[in-house]
Amino acid sequence: MPAKFPAYQAEGVIPACLLPFHDDLSVDFAGYKAHLRDVAGTRGINGITVNAHASEVSSCEYQEQVAVLDATMDAIGDSTPIINGVYSDSTMQAVKLAKMAAAGGASCLLVFPPNVLARGHAARPECLADHVRAVAAATDLPLILFQYGLATGLTYPMATLLELAAEIPQIKAIKDGSGDPVLAEKHVVALQGLSRPVNVLSTHSAWLMGSLVTGCKGLLSGSGSVIAPLQVALFEAVQRQDLAEAQRLNALVRATSEVFYAAPAFDMHNRMKEALVMLGRMQRAVVRPPLKKLGSAELGRIRAAMAAAGLEPRIQLAAE
């Protein structure tokens, strides 16, 4: 299936959707399609990301990822560009996933760094660079490179990013999760200043406004599964340099980010599922092990944050 949006530009607000499960841990595809339609109906977004961190891709087998993309295309693929994650510790498996996504109709790929390189990647950055080269050679789709945080040991050195950008025209953006404000601004200046610019998409959701004012061309974030309208409004206010409105909106966004991105970080999407249940937008907040159900105190903090952000519960979305 060819991409519905072959000239996709990786910019603007791109939510990463969650993946609901039944109590038996199987994928709730009816609930998933309802969630997709809800988020994709947000005015001003420029794509939806699937098979990524927000959808617990590390717990999804290959055939499940195929089924997730198929369900995505069925639900919203005619109207919304789809960015499919390429998440694997194996370059051979990453190539297989890239080809699958291209055949399935995705418009862009989000390339994750293999976790196996975390111990010592900085000493041999060519390993990660070659991983990207192999994915790029497997398909003509545009690529977004996920720039992991410095603490992970999987951050692309600037020299490597510039080398890949010059070599591979398919690289259209990075998803910047470096976690370092100084480095994040350097990414904006260096990559967006190239003769063939590479956009910087912030995923610094814990300090979103601060990251956007450096000049990012957009944002790509799992919290868009809950607060996509707020993200669009904040991005647009920053773009038109309306500081007062951006600050007002940022206060609402901050109310959610302070609970979603609290420690431990691995529970961020767990918390987002619970928020959607509270808001009447998802039926269950089931997560796959090793994740576990959140405790009552944390659920209370999430509920209070939704109210502080002005997010009102509504009638439960009807599943297909």
Image (cartoon, rainbow, N blue to C red):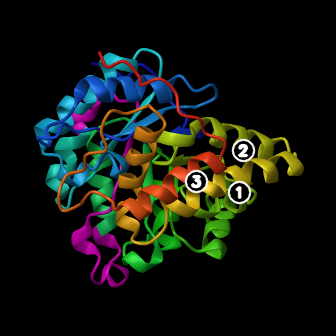
Q: Earlier in the sequence, mark 3 or mark 1?
A: 1
Q: Quadrant of residue 132?
A: bottom left
Q: Amino acid at mark 3?
A: Ala
> Left of 22 or right of it: where is 5?
right
Do tag 2 and tag 1 residues touch (Cβ < 8 Å)?
yes
Mark 1 element type: helix
Q: Residues within 10 Å of mark 1 (few under 14, many from 20)?
A: many
List the residue tagged with mark 2.
234
Q: Position of residue 309 (x, y in %)?
A: 65, 47
Q: Which residue is mark 1?
A: 209
Q: Quadrant of the N terminus?
A: top left
**65 sits left or right of 275 in the view:** left
246 left or right of 23 in image: right
Q: Amino acid at mark 1?
A: Met
Depth check, mark 3 against mark 2: the one in front is 3
Residue 32 seen anywhere in this rendered image of the structure: yes
Quadrant position of residue 133? bottom left
Q: CA distance from mark 2 to mark 1?
A: 7 Å
Q: Is residue 185 above or below residue 109?
A: below
**In terms of sequence position, does the residue under pointer 3 or pointer 2 come before the other?**
2
Q: What quarter of the picture does the C terminus occupy?
A: top left
Q: Is residue 22 left or right of residue 308?
A: left
Identify whether 117 is placed above or below 297.
Answer: below
Tell me the residue that label 3 is attached to. Answer: 305
Residue range of the region highlighted in magenta in the rendering: 99-127
